[in-house]
Image (spheres, coloured by chain):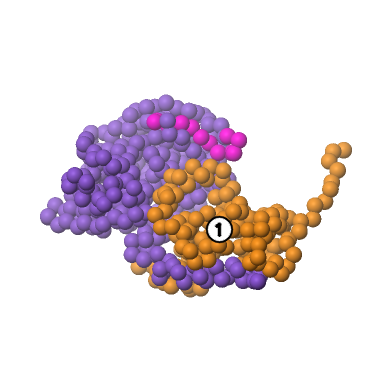
Chain colours: A orange, B purple
Amino acid sequence: MGTWEPVAEQLLEERGARLVAYAAMLVARDGDAEDLVQDAVVKCFSRRRPVATVGEAEAYARRAMQTIVIDRARARGVRRRATDRAFSREPRTPDLDAGLDVRRALRELTPREQVCIVMRYFDDLPVAEIAVRLELADGTVKRYISNATNRLAPLLAGAVDWDTPPERVEILATRKGK
Amino acid sequence: MSTFKEILDGGFEAHARALPAGGGFSGDRSRSVLRSIHRRRTARAAATAGGSVLAVGVLAVGAMALRPSGVAQPGMTPPITNGLYPWCNLSTYPSINPEALGAERYQGRIYADFANKVYTFVAPDGTTHGALQPGADGNYRVVGADGVEVALIDAGQFDDLAHSRFSSMALDFIDGRMGIFYEPGGPDGPMLGYEWTTVVPDKVPAGVDVVALSSTLAWTTLSEGLSFAASSVPPGAVAEIVFRWHDGRQQAIPLHDEFPSSAVTDYTDLASVSLRVSNLPDGGVFEITSTYDPSKTWQAACWPYREFAWATPTPRVGPFPSPSYNSATPAPSIVLEDAGPTPTPSYVGSPPTPSPDRSSVTPAPSPPAPSPPAPSPSSPSPSPSPTS
């Protein structure tokens, strides 16, 4: 047994539920969450120097989930690829009711918006950090968050007090051409 | 009224509490994850050590792993290609074994030259579509043997590959999945598929999806395939993977929805692996069986001599003390660079029917004439001595 295996087993056993719950905020249905976790954990422990502790592994797996979702969104052929994967099959288990309202609202967003809003409000990351992690421009991240909050506001009306104003994007008018 | 963060946190905590312990990662699912990690790490180790295998995770397709696997064949010598060490000359790379696929169909192969951005598709009937052009989305698509679209999707990894030693690959496409990944003689056993012959009964009960079940079975035999979908059998039917050994042992492992089938744990004296469906509406039993014959191992041509140690029944991956890939040794060449813009390896052009004598060391029906390896002070002995 490799040195990584006990850590991987412990991660799945102890943190599996939290990882799946986190993944469920990034995907379109609960049935895809486990598969996202699986891909992230495989990625985490396939590195030449895998993580040494469960806490480190959970953090890495979460980050991996974010980039995996973004990467898949980038590949337009992802839908076809997804249908080729086992996990794309219609899950037999329905979405769990617990916390479903907010997940349903998140799933109205595009994958990029979904990831950005979770990183911003759940992980408490500043825009600049999100931009670095996802290899996006700051302005792009701001736009995604702005779009997301604007779309979420009516969906969660009455439930959310937007304590901070929705992210604004500064648009500079530039003259094109000579 | 709560802040959005509080809403998110609350939803997360409630969901996590409502999930089963481990979030569903227990038993088969957990083992599947660990197995996937093993596979990736194995491929990575091999790539580091020998440069002859690569798992392309983002592509979700497999590169060819060229490593002899399975049982030793007395008297064999590894073929030599391109005057260097017998690394992966793609034109001599054996096609997949269609007989191992059951009801699935081989759709064709893409020869990907990432460095020169030349992608060539060869259908099983030999039809070649040279120099595929990218679509508007930057991906490469072509229609496979049965009208199935084969897509080579660049999710940003092509450039990386172009600058790596894996700048050329051969990628096989199978029904229902993007490709097949041959593991280089890792702990899961031989992966080229020539040890397996899969038979699907002619009479298929209503409600049984033989293509899906074949893919599930391939997870066990080829270490690649889709997981089991309960929808591929009639409601109420019971699906199992059944291992049978020549000494009479038998082991049946139930299949669960959306979980892959089990890996072979003991190849010694293994006779067959079946996917058995019982409790069918008519009371009958349906079974797709892959018989295992290690003597049919196709000895791939691409591995340093020292690694053709026939005495090792199940070669393990790295670290390989092969001196042939040190910095003083030129990298092995790839046939796509040699064969012109539209390489059509003859063996691919033929129907992918394996040679009757699969134990032959020659991996392809029409390989280029072997030539001796270039002398090198660091080269290992070119004369492996069969020991079994």
Amino acid type for the residue under numbered disc 1: Arg
Q: Secondary structure of the magenta portion, mostly?
A: loop
Specify whether residue B62 is in view.
yes
Q: Position of residue B366 (x, y in %)?
A: 34, 30
- At 16% from the left and 56% from the top, the residue drawn is B250
Q: Residues within 10 Å of mark 1 (few under 14, many from 20)?
A: some
- Is A83 inside the magenta-drawn segment? no
Q: Work out whether B176 lies above or below B34.
A: above
Q: Quadrant of residue B317?
A: bottom left
Question: Toward the viewer: B123 or A140?
Answer: A140
Q: Work out whether B111 lies above or below A88.
A: above
- At 79% from the left and 55% from the top, the residue drawn is A170
Question: Is residue A167 left or right of A98 when viewed as pictured?
Answer: right
Q: Position of residue B185 (x, y in %)?
A: 33, 52
Question: Is residue B326 left or right of B273 when viewed as pictured?
Answer: right
Q: Work out whether B176 lies above or below A27.
A: above
The residue to which callout 1 is attached is A104
Q: Quadrant of residue A158?
A: bottom right
Question: Toward the viewer: B8 or B72?
Answer: B8
Question: Is residue A53 left or right of A117 when viewed as pictured?
Answer: left
Q: Residue furthest front?
A: A158
Q: Which residues are magenta?
A: B135-146
Quarter holding the N terminus of chain B is: bottom right
Q: Secondary structure at mark 1?
A: helix
